[in-house]
Image: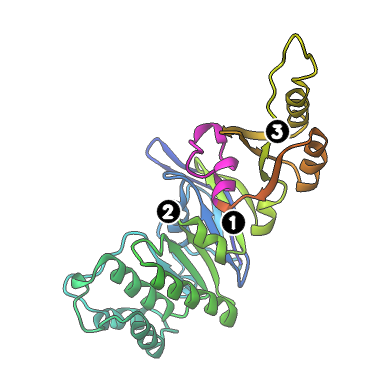
Amino acid sequence: MIQVKNLHKKFGKTKALDGIDLTVNKGSIYGLVGTNGAGKTTVIRHMAGILKQDDGEILFDGEPAFENPAVKQRIGLVPDELFFPKGYSIKDMTKIYNGTYDSFSTERLHELTQLFRLDEKAPLRSFSKGMKKQAAIALTLASMPEYLLLDEPIDGLDPIVRKLVWKQIVDDVAEREMSVMVSSHNLRDLESICDYVGIIDNGRTVIERDLESVREGINKVQVAFAQKQKSADDPQAGQETDDAEAAIAQLNVLHRDRHGSIELIITRDSAERIEEVLTPAKPLVLDVLPLSLEEVFIYELGGEKYDFSEIM
């Protein structure tokens, strides 16, 4: 288990982390989500033992990683920004990793380089960005880590390679109970592999739950009602519109928008509650849909700050 407790960090006068709390359970995949500048990379660098926190603690099965070689032996890191020594190949990097990690498996590395179709003898500088990322992932997984920290691991990878990478990680979690912390802007991929999700904003934890419960109680409603204008000759003509507004007012609405005749409503209500409230108003269309992780992320961080036209 990895525990991040009340983590604080300042760079000069800039407060990067302001009391982060996260828990990664053994044998689980944890998705770390946040806007640019939220503190995701800073959290991962602290977890890897690269940075020392100003306050709080990070524990791997009860032990800190900072200046602790025994714990770092068990941690694999694939950073967002990669660095390889000039002129080095994967074969050259193998010597470094093999001398650093007691559990390094040359056999596993060969399997992964063949899977990713990487030339172990070619200079890494000749690789594309995606190929360099694959090389880093192969070397790190071949270290057989107990804890895997990934910062934007699939950036630059094509869809086929992304699936291959995720499969290797999921297999390691299943076979060796490896614990994974992954930060990524690709929320669709995270949604398909993660057990737990943590959303951070401005250096603080906004929400931390298992993936299923993150989506519970928040729904997207597509609804349309008959549109009739009030008139002096027929005062009942606008009753449908009044009933609809009264029904919607009973919901805990987070966001509301209209596309033509269809109302799009994000509400913190169960599907049962939505149907119970809106059905008596006789809607012409009523669809209740679960939110994707991407939509939950946006609404949990405050809908008023974002343009929703692209996600609706």
The label nearer to you, 3 versus 2, is: 3
In the image, what residue type sits under mark 1?
Val
Residue at point 59%, 52% (across, down): 292
The label nearer to you, 1 versus 3, is: 3
Q: Dot 1: within a 10 Å radius of its alpha carbon, few (fewer than 14), some, or many (20 or more) residues? A: many
Which of the two discs, 3 and 2, labels the residue nearer the N terminus? Answer: 2
Magenta residue check for 309 = yes
In the image, what residue type sits under mark 3?
Phe
Residue 306 coordinates in the image, percent (x, y): 49, 36
Residue 18 coordinates in the image, percent (x, y): 52, 42
Q: Residue furthest bottom?
A: 107
Residue at point 50%, 56% (across, down): 187
Q: Which mark is residue 209?
A: none
What secondary structure is marked by label 1? strand
The label nearer to you, 1 versus 2, is: 1
What secondary structure is marked by label 2? helix
Task: State the separation of the CA atoms marked 1 and 2.
Answer: 16 Å
Residue 153 coordinates in the image, percent (x, y): 41, 64
Image height of 146 relative to 197, above or below: below
Q: Which residue is mark 3?
A: 225
Q: Is residue 5 visible?
A: no
- Left or right of 147, for residue 143: left
Read off the magenta span: 294-312
Task: From the viewer's side, name the closer residue of 16 and 107.
Answer: 107
Q: Which mark is residue 41?
A: 2
**Quarter of the image that includes the C terminus:** top right
Residue at point 56%, 66% (across, down): 193
Magenta residue check for 166 = no
Q: Residue furthest top?
A: 232
Q: Which residue is mark 1?
A: 197
Task: State the separation of the CA atoms marked 3 and 2.
Answer: 47 Å
